[in-house]
Amino acid sequence: MFVNLDLTAVLPVLIPLTLSVAGLLTGLSRITDKTRQIMLKWISAAIMVSAIVITVGHIEKTDKPQALLAMNNVNLLVLLLVCFMAIVLIKFSQRYLFAEKNTHRYWRWLFLSLTSVSVVIVSNHLLLFWLGWVSISLCFHRLLLFYPDRPRAVLAAHKKFILARVAEIFLLSAIVLLYSQLGTFYLAEMTNHYLSASIPVELSLAEKCAAIMLALTALIKCAQLPLHGWLIQVVEAPTPISALLHAGIINLGGFLLLSFAPLIAFSSDAQWLILIIAGLSTLISALVMMTRISIKVKLAWSTCAQMGLMLIECALGLHELALLHLISHSLYKAYMFLSAGDVLQEYSLKQLAPQKNVTFISAMSSLLLVVISTYGIVYFTSYSGPLSVWLLVNTALALYLVSAVRNGTVLQFLTSCLTVALLVGFYMGGKTILTWVMPPLPASTMFDAMDIWLSALFVALFLLAVQVRVFPQAKATRTLYRWLFSGLYLDELMTRLTLFLWPITLRPETAIKQNDQSLTKEPTS
């Protein structure tokens, strides 16, 4: 008797199964380091083969709205990104953790964290989705405590642990509310319900509350202000763990909004909640980043700002741009964290070189370029989407070009022009390709209230950045710099609230080392 088994329905389990087995095997404490190194090579090969098999199988997939695990175009891209990140982290960690103690704990929780991420990505049943979401936090918590004698790492893990529980409650509440309205736990059936609507759907109160809770879950997951402190302090963890967080796990907030995009698109309340909080987080984080010296801390603040931009793109309905942002940011941050040593050396060399500050003339030249390029988009193209996104892109590119004209040679200027052209081409090409991946949904339009709000924020970002760079000695600038350097004291307030609600004892690292040394000393007679 033969069972008719649809292999395409089984393929999504390959990656979670491979990663979970890898965690169980490499997490054994009794195996030797040499055996573990051999295992890791085979695990990398198994991940690569599984990714190829899933990609080939996805070409001939059949849609099953009630499948426990499902694979669509968005899930496939994100899952392949996770596989690539896993292989890179395995290779880097083998060298990074050489001669470290208790490496079996690191490998166990690394692979189990990646297993949980892959389960979330391929889950079609929302209860399984939620269990995977909870498992990510619990497994990653063990990674954050890899160095338990570092007080800042312990504090960051403690704050993240509390916030993760709050986010999980919001997510579970949203799932229950959606089930009460639609009568299904399957994500595909929910999204099909909203996509099949020929006219904008009038959401019920329960659906509006569910959309708001999903937005809050994404904001917490992406460490938006004022809940960002743990993300800044988590740099105390080993570099591969920081890379996994900034290049992978923190992006799940954007993935959540992309998964529920058909619902969020019809909830203006959830969209405005995201635009206000993520918009202000982007503005403040980008300015605070200018005051930081530590490379890892600058990257952490950069992640906070970039996550804000990605959430903004989701709220505006620019889902293909958000997906492009998710992929690009993951690859970029993985490279930056894993090559932090080289980046630090380059930064030190730049500090030794003559400093070339932004002048008022270059700032005004940049502003003129922004006005001209944005005007051209409005009046010489058929683009009707939100203008605020182009305003931000044009500002960044204009500052880059003006800096090249002022500080570089003719060859450097031509190279900068080519770089700008390639970046614009990458943006337009990636956006066009990913338009085929995301289903068509309502989006914000030019000069609507959302677009005007974001345009005002981006103009404020440009003006404040110019003030800090051009007029550093002005009284107002010194006051602004002091507040930015302190992060507006937001994390201090959240830390006090966290320790008030759930106190923990942080032992200084030196005291722990002295205690360990005293225990190892032989008693004298």
Image (cartoon, rainbow, N blue to C red):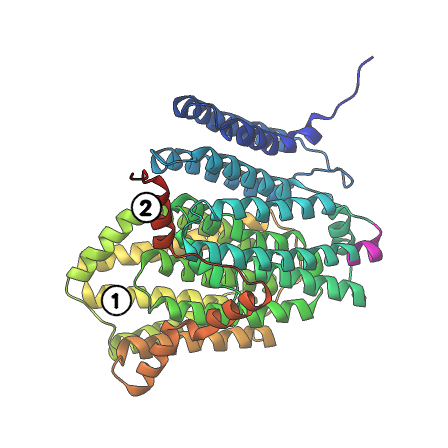
**Which stretch did the figure color magenta?**
177-183
Identified at 43% across, 51% down, the residue is: 426
Instruction: Residue 143: tell me if it is visible.
Output: yes
Q: Is residue 496 above or below residue 149?
A: below
Query: In front here: 417 or 113?
Result: 113
Decide if residue 97 is on the left or right side of residue 68: left
SS type, badge 2: loop
Near mark 1 (Cα within 10 A), the count class, few <14, some 14-19 or many ≥20, is: many
Residue tagged 1 = 403
Query: In front here: 329 or 185?
Result: 185
Residue tagged 2 = 339
Instruction: Residue 379: tell me if it is visible.
Output: no
Q: Which label number is shown at residue 333?
A: none
Q: Is residue 240 magenta?
A: no
Most prominent secondary structure in the magenta stretch? helix
* Quadrant of the rendered image containing residue 318: bottom right
Decide if residue 333 is on the left or right side of residue 501: left
Q: Amino acid at mark 2?
A: Ser
